[in-house]
Image (spheres, grey):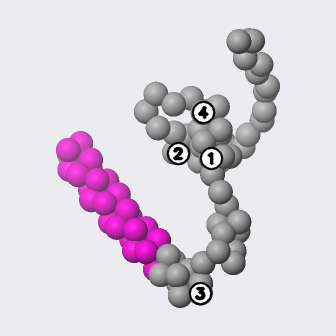
């Protein structure tokens, strides 16, 4: 197996922070990029689902986002209380 080649890229701080937020434990930024770049875009799904299925998916996504935000708020409150 050959040596891994490396490339340097420039990212805005915002772009880097977004990648960092997607990073899993013990995952490098390169691995994050590979994982995300390999995912399918929702645009690629056009025509594969009915309007009703797409609507149900959007509702499920919004529900999950609300749950995530609520959990994030509870975690932030807990941190603030702990720091006292």
List the residue tagged with mark 4: 31
Q: Between residues 66 and 60, which one lies in front from this camera angle? A: 60
**As drawn, is 23 to the left or to the right of 43?**
left
Q: Quadrant of residue 50?
A: bottom right
- Comes first in the chain, label 1 or label 4: 4
Image location (x, y in percent) of residue 9 = 78, 32
Task: Name the mark nearer the viewer: 3 or 4.
Answer: 3
- Comes first in the chain, label 3 or label 4: 4
Instruction: For the residues labelled 2 and 1, say whether their Cβ atoms are less than 8 Å apart.
Output: yes
The secondary structure that most of the magenta stretch takes on is helix
Task: Please identify the quadrant where the N terminus is shown.
Answer: top right
List the residue tagged with mark 1: 36
**As drawn, is 2 to the left or to the right of 71?**
right
Disc 3 crowd, CA 10 A, few/some/many (<14, 14-19, 20+):
few
List the residue tagged with mark 2: 22
What's the magenta region?
59-83
- How far separated are the C-alphas under marks 2 and 1? 9 Å
Label 4 SS: helix
Task: Name the mark nearer the viewer: 4 or 2.
Answer: 4
The question of residue 70 being in magenta is answered with: yes
Q: Is residue 80 positioned above or below 24 on the image?
A: below
- Comes first in the chain, label 2 or label 3: 2
- How far separated are the C-alphas under marks 4 and 2? 10 Å
- How far separated are the C-alphas under marks 3 and 1? 26 Å
């Amino acid at each position: 197996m050959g040596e891994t080649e490396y490339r340097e890229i420039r990212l805005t701080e915002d772009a880097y922070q977004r990648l960092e937020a997607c990073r899993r434990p013990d995952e490098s930024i390169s691995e994050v990029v590979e994982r995300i770049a390999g995912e399918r875009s929702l645009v690629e799904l056009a025509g594969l689902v009915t309007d009703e299925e797409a609507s149900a998916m959007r509702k499920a996504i919004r529900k999950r986002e609300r749950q995530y935000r609520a959990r994030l708020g509870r975690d932030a409150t807990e941190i603030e209380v702990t720091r006292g």
